[in-house]
Amino acid sequence: MRAFTHWKCFFCSLLATLFLLTSVAGAAEESQPSGLPTLSPAAKISLVTCSPGDELYTAFGHSAIRILDPELGFDRLYNFGTFDMTVGNFYLRFARGDLLYQLSVDQGDADIEEHGALGQGVTEAQLNLTPEQKQSLFAALETNLAPENRYYRYDFLLDNCSTRVRDVFEKIIGTSVADKTVSGVTFRQMLDPYLDRIPWIRFGIYLLLGAGVDRLVQPREACFLPANLESAICQTKVSNTPFAQSPVRLFPARPLSRIPRALDPEIVFSVVLIGWIGLWAFRGGRASRVISALVYIVFGFTGLFLVVLAANTLHWEAYQNWNVAWLVPTHLVAGIGLLFVPANKVLMLRLYLFLAMVEGLVFVVSSPWLPQRFHPAIYPLVVLLLWRTVIELRRKVVP
């Protein structure tokens, strides 16, 4: 953690949302690095798992490999979730999906104590490896640590700091590492429990992630979450021998804070909508055309952002985003038109608003059967758009 601004796991980064990234990684060389010491019989190799923390970049926890050899006098913690925030155009590269992550190494006990001090729970599961397997794992990690091998293109779900650990384990033991308790759930459903305490971030991630994350997760893929990776290694057997011992808790997890549920987006949007309609009715149905125009502009601009993001990013998670079915990008043009002229004075604008109303109603009715799961907070927003549309279609214009 000292060499870079932050150590992050996937999910160590959001979003995230955003959110979201690519899946091509350079393969490590097979040869053992020159000058690599031979681990002593007392060497222990373990999986270290950190629970979620308060900060967004710790929302999903963290996985790392620890090699502790008291006879050689080192305690190394290998972390595949490191990136450099000082790199040029950091946020643009993050959005495009070409920000490189890398393998780094740190002092094991210091890093573990730091996570524990931040309130994250830390567990350690020692691996049952032969001396030859321990040495091979050590060599593989050191080979990946070389400057020409350490960088890789991070994928939010398929190639992150936990799946990289899984891949190293599989290479050494020659068998699949999978969480067989995971069945019949999607990536989005696996993410939901981690996002429940940060509901507004959850809402944003739901907007950014497309239909691809609503496919069923395979047991091996479930290891993209650190807790599931820990579960997987405890289920894995090598020649009928457990691959890992039961995890030992090094630090307990502190309770994570959550905003009151009354402030969740679906509650806030519903209250605002009901209050707004009530105020409109109290004022005798008088409404500002400028407000309607701004609603259309906000919806259209958000939809345009989702389309531009999907067209210019390597994050496959942002593709096939059905949110543009209600955040229609062309609403931006209609909103700008409404700023200058009432809909009843321009036939094309009136026709567009009518079609937008029909499309919005079709979306609400059909959304449960679409291939993407939507956040419940979008429905008050769709009703808001439909309401403002009806207002403009019914507006009487004095010649």
Image: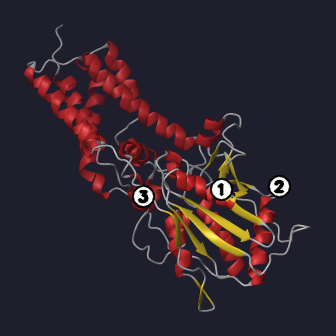
Q: Is residue 14 visible?
A: no
Q: CA distance from mark 1 to mark 3?
A: 34 Å
Q: Is residue 185 above or below residue 148?
A: below
The kind of secondary structure element at disc 1 is helix
Q: What residue is drawn where x is 50% and y is 71%?
A: 218
Give the residue number, with chain letter if any, for mark 1: 110
- First of labels 1, 2 by sequence position: 1
What residue sits right under mark 2 in the picture? Answer: 148
Tag 2: residue type? Glu
Where, quadrant-wise, is the C terminus in this rendering? top left
- Disc nearest the viewer among 3 and 2: 2
* In this view, 255 is above or below 92: below
The amino acid pointed to by label 1 is Ala
**Of helix, strand and loop, which one carries label 3?**
helix
Residue 381 vertical position relative to residue 151 in the rendered view, above or below: above
Who's the residue at 22% across and 32% down the image? 272
Q: Are marks 3 and 2 in contact (CB under 8 Å)?
A: no
Front residue of 167/373: it is 167
Viewer-side residue, 38 vs 273:
38
Secondary-structure class at tag 2:
loop
Label 3 to label 2: alpha-carbon separation: 34 Å
The reply to whether residue 247 is in sight is yes
